[in-house]
Amino acid sequence: MKSSHFFRILHMTILSFMFVSFKIYALENTDERVKNLTLELRCMTCQNQSIYDSDAEFSNDIKKIVKQKLLEGKSERDIKIFLVDRYGEYILFRPLMNYNNIFLWSFPFILLIFGLFFVLIKIKTKKV
Amino acid sequence: MSSLFGFLSLIFATGINFYLFFSRYILRFQSQRFNFFIRLSSLLTLLSFFSLMYAYIISDFSNYNVFQNSHSNKPLIYKISGTWGNHEGSMLLWLSTLSIFSFFFSFTKNIEDDFKKLTLIIQSFLHILFSLFIIFTSNPFLVNSILVNEGLGLNPILQDPGLAVHPPVLYAGYIGYSIVFSIAIAGLFQNKDDEWLYVAKKWSLISWTFLTGGIALGSYWAYYELGWGGWWFWDPVENISLMPWIAGLALVHSLMMVRGEQAIKKWIVFLSILCFSLSVFGTFLVRSGILTSVHSFAADASRGIFILLIFFIVTGFGFLVFLLKEPKKSNSLNLLFINKVSALVINNILMIIATLTILLGTIYPIIIEVLYNKRISVGGPYFNSTVIPIMIPGFLLMSIAPILSWQTNKIINSKKYALGFIILSILVLIQSFFLEFNTWGLVGLLLGFWIILASIIAICSSYKVKFTIKFFQIINPHIAHIGVGIAIIGITCSSIFQTELDFNLNEGDKFNVNGKMVLFEEIATTNQINFQSLRGKFLFDIEKDESRKIEAGKNYYPVSKMITSEAGILHQWNKDIYFILGDQKNNEWFVKVLINPFVSFIWLGVIIMMYSGLIAVTRR
């Protein structure tokens, strides 16, 4: 079948892409890590702005703290826990994956599985 | 005076709609007489809206609403846009838009009279709900109890041309779905033939096009006015407009299946009800203040509860009719791996999952606050890591969907596509290795280019290229998808390959941006009619003769004591150079320069999608 051939090639290309990209993903420097982390933090004195994007005093302080802690060798998780203790979970744009947020994080994927299931049942496998 | 006039027209219009909805004889009316009443009520509602606008234009501060939200030294355009720059006025705009849609619908020719009447009666019902809401909780025609000769001013953030036209366009999108809703309900009651599906398709395309325009205007405004360098922030207010947009997209695509004689009526009716429900729900979330905090909602709950009630009536009524008068089971779907029908079904499922995920993410903080009295944020990172992966298979499918066949699972010219895909992947991979490597960047670029390439292959190999109207109608789905591809490239480049440069500068300093020398000329302050402005003036590319001027700075609005930032943007076809003037420290100005590659592609893509929406309206 022509079409299955086509999809096999498609899959191969996508898989090789993913492989290459993961190898390169590991390289990042401190500034980059500060950026990635502060992009996920809310500036508490602004309106729906991330700490990275904001130039408010609050944000600049947090940026300094984050950079310092990263240089000290703290992990991103440690820093997040530190900030949540200080300012509450409200500071995190990416909600923690904890008991309260199980539903939030699993919901899309449950729906996805249901959707997949539905399609698999309904699709006719016989060839026309 | 104009306020009294406006209020009376509003009352009369509501009265007519009460008559239309509750009179038992109405269905026996000749359609001409019936249409006359509908049009009269529409005109009265519009009259009411324009008299409020008139009060704004002449700065009639005896109207409490004008006094609260306007100021006599505002430019005329912001006096006009001030009409809908506040809660009461925007609800009147909502009602007027509803009337306009009913008005135009009453001229539709190719449907049965009874069906049209029923649709319009449901519109009347919606009209009654919203006008009662306006009259009892948000009357814009209240008289000011004190005598004043100056108003309190309009929120400076709203004093911007983009945001002045944003609400009417967005509302046209939201409320366009009211017609689709009414048609679907009427279709359930009078389950005769499938003619109504074609009518619904036309109106859902119109609403979707408006909604696209409204959202794009809003995000373009955020781009140049907020001065953060981005154009989409997954802000709750943005999410709210995105939900009916995605659901509406699913609806438009489902209605395509009608053409393939694969009508899945049940699903279409469900989506029609969902779209309008989401629009009303969005209005509830924005207007009740519940988004900022549950406590601010509780402080003035009457409005919020009223809209919530409307939401439950509309949704409840819609889904109740849906359950009781379920459409007859249509012929079962011809789902194959993979033909057009299954591609559309999968895309629909993905779109609905995306919509529901956005909905959950938007209301989750509210739920948590109510349950645990704790505030959390669900922001960009959540949506980026849920919604985008969900959409990616959809985008992949979309690239080939228009050429799939309805009946069989054969793909015409599959070799050409495979070859095209492989060459494209190699090119994109090489490009990303030599420039800057980023996984998401690679995926985005590949997707974008692939969608465009596949659409072009499809156009060239399946149809004879002619420059007639009919040809453009036939290739329209491909054109729409090319628009999406272009937008994906723009979105990927501008969000992932954005570069940021920070400078601390004195006046007269020269600095290097992207290989071009820029001169920081001076800081200038000027007094405008209703604000004071502070501008950093820059000359871009001073080594060339035709260097470009860029001004970035801030405005201070004394009436409302607010500062807004004004980014200076140099638009080029392949990148925007975005200047933000920060604060002065130790006699040096902080200047942030962002280079946003290919932002213009986003707007181009959106314009192409809107064009396609309009072309699709013309085709049956």
Image (cartoon, coloured by chain):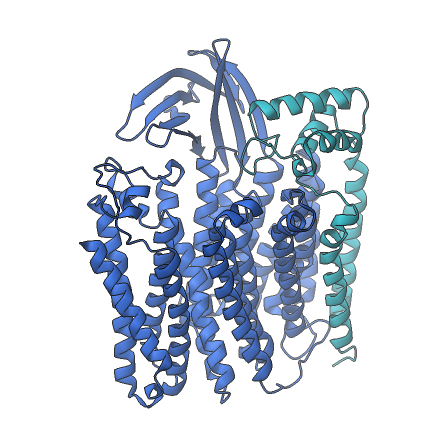
Residue B393's spot in the image, x, y percent? 69, 58
Assign the N terminus of chain B to one quadrant of the image. bottom left
Residue B608's spot in the image, x, y percent? 46, 55
Which residue is located at x 72 percent, y 62 percent?
A111
Assign the C terminus of chain B to one quadrant of the image. bottom left
Which residue is located at x 41 percent, y 82 percent?
B118
Residue B44's spot in the image, x, y percent? 25, 66
Q: Nearer the viewer, residue B18 or B322?
A: B18
Q: Nearer the viewer, residue B428 or B581?
A: B581
Q: How many numbered marks, from 0 up?
A: 0
Chain shown in cyan:
A
Is the residue B562 above or below the residue B182 in the image? above
The answer to whether residue B422 shows anywhere in this view is yes
Is the residue B36 above or below the residue B448 in the image? below
Is the residue B467 above or below the residue B194 in the image? above
Chain shown in blue:
B
